[in-house]
Amino acid sequence: MSAQTSKKEKVDLIVSGGTVVTMDGTRTVYDDGAVAVKGDSIVAVAPRIEIDAKYAAVQVVDAKGKLVLPGFINGHTHVPMTLLRGLHDDVTLDEWLRKYIFPAEAKNVTEEFVRWGTRLAAAEQIRGGVTTFADMYYFEDAVAEETKAAGMRGVLGETFIDFPAPDNKTNAVALDYTEKFLKRWQGDPLIHAAAAPHSIYTCSKKTLQDAAALARKYNAPILIHVAEMKKELDDSRAQNGTTPVQYLDKIGVLGPDVVAAHCIFVDETDRQLLAQKQTGCVHNPSSNMMLASGVSPVPELRAAGVAVGLGTDGPAGSNNDLDLMEEMDLAAKLQKITKMDPRALGAQSVVEMATIEGAKALHMEKEIGSLETGKKADIILIGLDAPNAVPMYDIYAQLAYALKGSDVQTVVIGGRIVLRDHKLLTVDEPAAIAKAREYKTKVAASLGMEK
Ligand SMILES: [Zn+2]
């Protein structure tokens, strides 16, 4: 080693070369940039020549000719439901829930089911460049263990619902389970344990308030579906005399620790209230279209100052995949067609929603969402050599409208390489795929379906 090299600061990893799209405050892009990583965090983002002069790395990832971005953030999903993907689509939400999903969950959802579903979802999400996801399901402690094992970052909420769930049969048991869950994961670098009261239409006022109070005792986030159906709005007006958003505020649940999925039926007063309370919103265009729920006023929410992220929802019945790049494309196009104006929501805005705005919606913008010194090293490399990737006139347009999840080549989460040149390093993917097929036979038989 030369004298000059030894003077350089030692780091663990350098992602070197390529077009670094930082998503920082001024949306800096380095045409030939580099990212230096120490432990699980970024120590520097700069032109490659500057990084090369200052740092020496144990490991170098060559990003020449690729796009380098902060990892994508899937702000709303139910990952174990990968195992129910495509169970029965093209029916109304009510029929789908009553005739298929609730019976299938009652007969099949166990801790083992949740583990395999989470492994499958981790493989799918990592391959598509998702490094952080927010989840609402049952046996969430097992979801957390599998998420950590896959090396992913998760905001994971144990569901509260006013009927016997597959794991906790009463709300008293759910509170007890969730308290242990929140305690166990405090301070974990990857897992943010959360409480997830399902919605105002499945939870009583007491259930909502109890779940929120428990989360707040541990400074944990609160995940909830909000204003996702016209019926929810109509019922809330009839029963609570106000909108879902204003009802949640009235009972003390709305706040800067809440992540509200959907926010479709939100009027101007609701939007101002969401902004004032610093509540995050997550838009799920595939789900809203597939279930014909309605169109969230995303440009109006953003204009009011609300942080709006993007989610896949699903993956069963309301999507059916976990491809966040598809959501970027659909989010933009859904606004354009709804408003009959191609300027309604643009490419850069939806890339922001998948990264830095998504981080704000999850209240994690100090930790993730951009490539900046001090943030977690969640970095993805996207190839630009496929036919659909050339030529590239505009980076954001390419990301939103041309590139696909399958163009993601390498993924780093918290400084650890979890996907290298399309090779998954942290999940036994063949085993997860085989298990998914086994569960299909089992679930179909439990519902008396053919084959
Ligand atoms: Zn959902």
Image: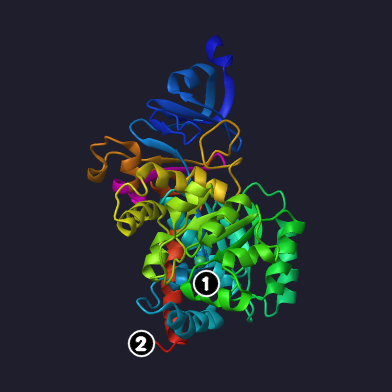
> Along the polypeptide, which appears first: circle 1 or circle 2?
1
In this rendering, the answer to whether 46 lies above or below 233 is above
Q: Mark 1 or mark 2, which is nearer to you?
A: 1
- Residue under label 2: 450
Q: Residues within 10 Å of mark 1 (few under 14, many from 20)?
A: many
Q: Residue furthest bottom?
A: 448
Q: Quadrant of the rendered structure where residue 377 is? A: top right
Look at the image and give the residue range highlighted in magenta: 401-415
Q: Residue at x 50, y 16 (%)?
A: 53
Give the amino acid at mark 2: Glu
- Which of the two residues, 65 or 212, is positioned nearer the viewer here? 212
Separation of marks 1 and 2 at Cα, in angstroms = 38 Å
- Which of the two residues, 149 or 399, is positioned nearer the viewer here? 399
In this rendering, the answer to whether 131 lies above or below 197 is above
Q: Residues within 10 Å of mark 2 (few under 14, many from 20)?
A: few
Give the amino acid at mark 1: Leu
Q: Quadrant of the rendered structure where residue 207 is? A: bottom right
The percent position of residue 286, horizontal first and vertical second, equals 39, 62
Residues at badges 1 and 2 in contact (C-beta under 8 Å)? no
In this rendering, the answer to whether 30 lies above or below 347 is above
Q: Residue at x 57, y 74 (%)?
A: 236
The percent position of residue 95, horizontal first and vertical second, equals 43, 83
